Every structure is written in C-alpha cells, then in structure tokens.
Amino acid sequence: MLFIDESGSITRNKSRNCRYFVIAIVESDNPSHVKRIFKKAKVKFLKTHASKNYAILDYRKEIKGSEMPSKMKKYIFNELKKKTDVKFHYIVIDNHHLKDDFFDNVELCFNFVLCNYLKNLLQLNNQKDLSIQLDERNCSVKSLNSLDGYLKIELMLKNNIINEFNGCKYVDSTKSDLVQVADMVANTVYRSCKHDSKDGANALIMNQYFNDGNMYFPNRANNLECYTHDIYKLIDNNHKRH
C-alpha cells in the first residue's frame, strides 16, 4: 500500500524558491505496525526532550513535518526503518524544465509523472497489486477518478504491470498516521531542495533513510547535490545482479 503527500506546487514561477515540487511516497505492507511504531517514536522523542523547546508539540495531535526539528524527524525515520517494513520514496519535479502543456494541466502532469515512477517502482519490487491513499488536501489531484483511470489504463490494461488495482482514495491526514509520515518525507525533501547541499541536515536524512528508489523529472535537468538513490540506477543494478 502506498501513502502519498506533496510539497510545493507546479507553477510557471521562475524564482529559485518555486523551482521544485515534491511527491512523497510511503510504502508498507503492514501499515498498522508502522502506525504503532510511529506513535511510539513521537511520544518517546518528545518525552525524552521535554526540557527542550519542543513543548509546543503535542504527540496526541497531528504534527506537520514543517513543525518538526530535523533531529526529531531523523529519530522517527530511524525507528520506522529499524522496526517496520516501511520504505520511503520521493519524486522531485523541476518546474524550470517542464513543458508548457503540463502547466496548463497540473493534474495531467501529476498523473503522468506519478505513473511513470510507479511503472519503475512496481517492476523493481516485482509487485502485482496496488492501493493508494492521498492526503485529501492534495492540490494537484482534482479528481480521484482521473488518477484512478490513468493508472488503471497504464499499469493494468496497457502495460500489464499489475494484476489488481484497489484504486485511490482521499484520507484526512489528521486521522492517517502514514500520510503524516509522507508529509514528513515531503517536507524533508522540499527543504533540502530549496537549500541544496549534500551536507545539510535534511539531505543527510534523505541519503540515509530515503534509499529505496527516487526520481527526478525531467531527469536530464537534475543537478541537485542532495538527490540520491535514483530508481533507474537501482533498476540497472538489479538487472546486472540477475
């Protein structure tokens, strides 16, 4: 099952701060276990650091990735990686190198790029079924039917990559812990892209924990120092081993 959130926007704005749009994807076959570990990690971190300036953060409520210090995010990602089957992925869309047609139809851009990524991810994992949950505040997907239909045609009917598609559905992030984790991923990547450096706190988190296949679109324009673990390279390495 995949849980998706986003950060930034698809825009013609040419300023440096508006260059990147991030799609974050959290993958798990046992989301209930991920949920338990995520909640325990939040509680333990905040109780351990009660004397710090984290008192305003309430583990009983949703804590946005933008509210978390990098130290807290790193602790949670480490706990999830160590104790669950979770995988963290991200897609970086470069607004400065998109075709004009994508700006005219943001939803088409989102569907096209996500689908291209999933084609690679599903084949890399040899996965034959798919289910997706997205934050209901997602600004790029105006119609779940549009995304549903696009993915079904491309992944099932046209390319025969999956056998079963359970569809896409919106969820309230305040009630979905895994979408909250996806928000943490999106925020970490977005911040790192804006202040690009392979040695930044967010970039170090990305390199250590987001290592299960990522994508830059369009790939030819990629010059980010913080970007690592490209999904195409993982696929090439996988083919060489076999």
Image (cartoon, rainbow, N blue to C red):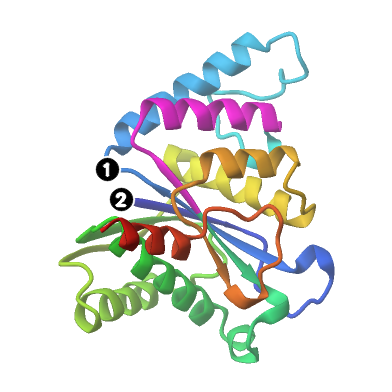
The amino acid pointed to by label 1 is Asp
In this image, 189 relative to 43: left or right? right
Rendered residue at 78%/19% (across/down): 53
Q: Quadrant of the C terminus?
A: bottom left
Q: Tell me which segment is drawn in magenta.
A: 69-89
Q: Position of residue 150 (x, y in %)?
A: 34, 79
Residue pictured at 32% horizontal, 74% vertical: 151
| Magenta residues, dominant SS class | helix
Q: In the image, residue 107 lies at what x, y percent?
A: 51, 77
Say which residue label 1 marks.
29
Give the total of numbered labels: 2
Q: Earlier in the sequence, mark 2 or mark 1?
A: 2
The answer to whether residue 31 is visible is: yes
| Three-letter amino acid code at the position of disc 2 | Met
Q: Are marks 2 and 1 in contact (CB under 8 Å)?
A: yes
Q: Is residue 242 magenta?
A: no
Q: SS of the residue at dot 1? A: loop
Residue 177, label in figure = none
Instruction: Using the numbered discs, state the Cα–Cα distance from disc 2 to disc 1 in whole angstroms.
Output: 6 Å
Residue assigned mark 2: 1
In the picture, measured across the screen, residue 80 lies left or right of residue 43, that is left
- The crowd level at tag 2 (other Cα within 10 Å; few <14, some 14-19, many 20+) is some
Question: Helix or strand or loop: what does disc 2 sit on?
Answer: loop
